[in-house]
Every structure is written in C-alpha cells, then in structure tokens.
Image (cartoon, rainbow, N blue to C red):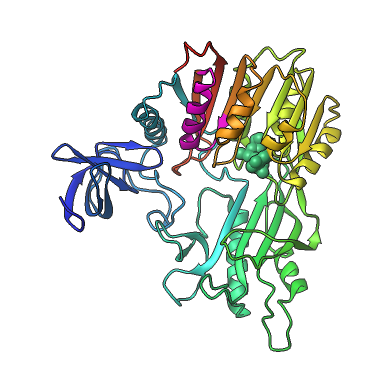
Amino acid sequence: MKKGDELILKIEKMKYPNIGIGYVNDKKVHVKNVLSGQTVRCRISKNRSEKRIGRLLEVVEPSAEEQNSFCEHYGLCGGCLFQTLSGENQLRAKFDMVKLLFDEAGIEVPLDTIMESPSLFEYRNKMEFSFGDEIKDGPMTLGMHKKGRYHDVVTVDKCHLVDEDYRVILRAVLDYACEQKLPKFNKNTFEGFLRHLVIRKSYVTGEILIGLSASTQPIYEDGTLFNQAEFVNLLRGLPLKGEIIGVLYIKNDGVSDVVQGEYDVLYGRDFLYEKLFDLTFKVSFYAFFQTNTAGAEKLYESALDLIPELEGKLALDLFSGTGTIGQIMSKKAKQVIGVEIVEDAVASARENMMLNSIENCEFHCGDVFKVLSEMTLSPDVIVVDPPRSGMGEKTSIKIAGYGVEEILYISCNPKTLLEDLMVLSRQGYEPVKMHLVDMFPWTGSVESVCLLKKVSLNDSL
Ligand SMILES: C[S@@+](CC[C@H](N)C(=O)[O-])C[C@H]1O[C@@H](n2cnc3c(N)ncnc32)[C@H](O)[C@@H]1O
C-alpha cells in the first residue's frame, strides 16, 4: 500500500470522531464520513507506519443496517452523518465510537449507557447558517458547509433539525439578498458583505432572535449599507409560529469565519428567554446555551443525579455559561459559585438568579484558571462543563488541587474529555460512572457525563 493507491475497504468499526476503521493485510486504515459495515472505495492520502488515512471516493455497498435518509440535503450537507441509520442504531454507533476511543487509549471508563434525545427532529434552538455558494462563483446559497468542504455552502431550507420557522426565515433572507443583489463576503479577498445568519428560537417560549453577520463595507455607490428598516419589516412580516423579538446587525469584519463583533440592535432586544424545568433563563445573543432544550433537561437531570448529596455543600459550577447548572444545583446546595469567561453570559446568569429568586449563587467573570487562582475557596463538589477544547492540563491540575471527593465532568467532546481524564487520573481521580446523552441526533456529536471520585494516587489509573 502506498500514497495515492485506490482500494476497496470494508469498514469494520468506528471511533470518535466519525473515523471509520478498515484493515488491509492487518494494517489499519482510517476513513472519514463512512459508517460501520459499509464497503467503500478510497484513496490512500497518508501512509505512515503509525497512521494510514484513506479519502472516501465512493460507498460501494451500504451497511446492512442502512435505510433511506429522510432529508434531501443528506450527503451534501456537512451537518448530519447518521441519517441512514435508525434512531436506535445511531445511538449504538455513537456509544461504540466513544467506547473505542477510550479503549484504544487504554483508559477504562465505566461507560454504561446512551440516553436518547426527547425529540429526534426539530430539536435545535439555535442555528448558524453561512452565506456562500455551492460551486465557485455560482448563485448565492445560505446554509451549511458541504461535507468536508470549507468554502462550499448548501442551502438547507428543508433541514429537519430545526423547525419550520427557521426554514421560512432562511428562505426569505436568501431570496431578499438575491433580489437586492447584496454581495456575499469573500473569505479569500475579505471583500463583500453577507457572512452568516444566526437564528435562535426558544423551544419553550417561542421567542426568536435573529442576527445578520455581515461586514461594514458599503454596498452601494453612495456609500450606504443595506436597507435595515426594510430588512426588519421583511422578517416581521413572515408567517411564523414563534415571535421575532429581536433583529441584530453584527458588524463582522474579522478574518476568521466565525460570528463575532459588536452589533446594532435593529429591532427589539438582544436576548431571549428560555426555560429549563421551572427556571427561566435570559439568554443573550453571544451566550452559550445548550442547543437542544429538552435534551438539556435530560442531560442536567441525569448528570446531577450522580451527585445527589448536595445539601449543605459549596459547589463550583465551572464554565457556567448563563448559570444553568449552578442554578439547578442551588436548589439543594448551600452555595454555588460559577465561573464563566463571556461577560454577557455572566450578566445573564446574574439576572437569571433574580428572575428565579435565587440568592445562594454568585457568578464570576474570567478564565477559570485565573479566577480560581485569585480566590481562596474550599469547595465540596466541583462541576465542570468546558467548551470543545476541554479544560487543558493547567486547569485540570488546579481543579484537582482542591481535593474534593467528587468532580462531575460534562463534556461535548469525548476526545478532550479523555485528555483531561488522563491528567485528572494522575492527580488521583478515577472515573466511577459515565454515560452519554444524544443531544444532537443524526449528527456525529454526543454529550458525555462522567463522575470522578478521589482515590489514593496508588489506586488511580
Ligand atoms: C459547553 S459551555 C457550558 C455552559 C453552561 N455550563 C451550560 O450548560 O449552559 C462552555 C462555556 O465555557 C465558557 N468558557 C470557555 N472557555 C472558558 C474559560 N477559559 N474560562 C471560563 N469559561 C470559559 C464558554 O463561554 C461557555 O459558556
């Protein structure tokens, strides 16, 4: 086998994140965007003794478990990966992928189950669509990046992960942009205007917050930008089930392809209200909030069930976002201290406390490592819910340094969870319970919950 060779491969198993594994003469080949049981044709793009990678050219034969997908964008759109599996089989696929990741790293985790999302369709409360084109210099599109492509964008106005309101708004904004000949932003030359459309819709209250991310470059010869009042009227005139409570223009001149920058509020307000259990949360535009509201209740409930004895305790809610986990814990704990880096999210968390008549929480703004280093604390329980990049070694060691009996780790990325667990295990913490919650049906993502207990260093992994 050498680089450039084409070969037919049977995918034997999957490892997180979505890496198919097949064998050629006992040599392992990794292929992305495949499913276990498929026979695929691939071209070897890397051939090293420690790693061989095949680039998928074609699925020659589907796996016996596969059925028709339910979405017309499936295959092209980079969002979903498991639509040709049944709900049950995608759960098993996710469980097996995560299990193999840990097994191959030689880390024993007591992974016992994967919980299904309460809704399999239209479950998302936020979507970020990109403006672009499907083929170079083709007509403007608005939607998701094509599978495996950085530049190409597929219009996803039939997407089943969001409800009808998202589809109506997406279509209307794209039609308007085309009619008005508003230019899309070019990621190579940094010229042009339209970049992203962000839609947040509360699953419970139905409030809709829309953010148009675009450059500040003038569009018309007289130096003017787009007609903001007309844009707002267009959106407010749409036949929607929910109610638009805010429209923002995000002035995004950044070089990276992310939604960022200050914004002007063109209409209404820059936050919406969402509910979890009996708690109300004000969610500001940039604040993190779990994208599957009903799934978040299942996630938090199943996670916090692992630490039932919170009475009289001081609990830390690290990477606290809008303070969801902290406020749920505050019902039992004596006191909760949250730490979060996004200022808006911290401001929301503080307001949320008042909204929910909670007095035993405090939220601090800043990097977890830094804030903890500046405080003297003796917590009893620590809950961490870091971003995809994980906590990192320095912060993991800092947290282990408190010596609490239990650390509850909630993670949206099993790979960084694994890395952090390795650090924590060297500090004397052992995973004693772990389960997964499928917060993102049909996609390759999954949420993990892991309870760690302090053991003597000699007993740890
Ligand atoms: C996965 S979210 C969890 C939020 C919250 N626990 C929830 O469930 O809604 C991760 C949060 O960590 C915050 N964050 C990222 N890096 C951070 C850091 N170095 N220090 C503090 N917070 C950070 C992000 O802004 C985000 O709100």
Stretch in magenta:
410-430
Ligand 1 is located in which of the four quadrants? top right
Residue 3: quadrant of the picture: bottom left
Task: Give 365 or 325, whichever is nearer the viewer.
Answer: 365
Q: Is residue 353 left or right of residue 47?
A: right
Q: Is residue 377 above or below residue 140?
A: above
- Residue at image coords 63%, 26%: 399
Residue 150, x across and y down, in percent: 45, 62
Task: Give 311 or 128, whichever is nearer the viewer.
Answer: 311
Q: Is residue 217 left or right of residue 438?
A: right
The secondary structure that dominates the magenta segment is helix
* Total numbered circles: 0
**Res. 203 visible in picture:** no
Task: Give 91 or 315, whichever is nearer the viewer.
Answer: 315
**Res. 107 visible in picture:** yes
Residue 99, x across and y down, in percent: 39, 28
Residue 450 part of the magenta-drawn span: no
Q: Is residue 437 above or below residue 156?
A: above
Q: Is residue 2 above or below residue 458?
A: below
Residue 384, x across and y down, in percent: 63, 30
Task: Give 406 or 182, whichever is nearer the viewer.
Answer: 406
Residue 64: quadrant of the picture: top left
Residue 391, x across and y down, in percent: 58, 35
The quadrant the C terminus occupies is: top left
Residue 414 part of the magenta-drawn span: yes
Extreme left residue here? Answer: 25
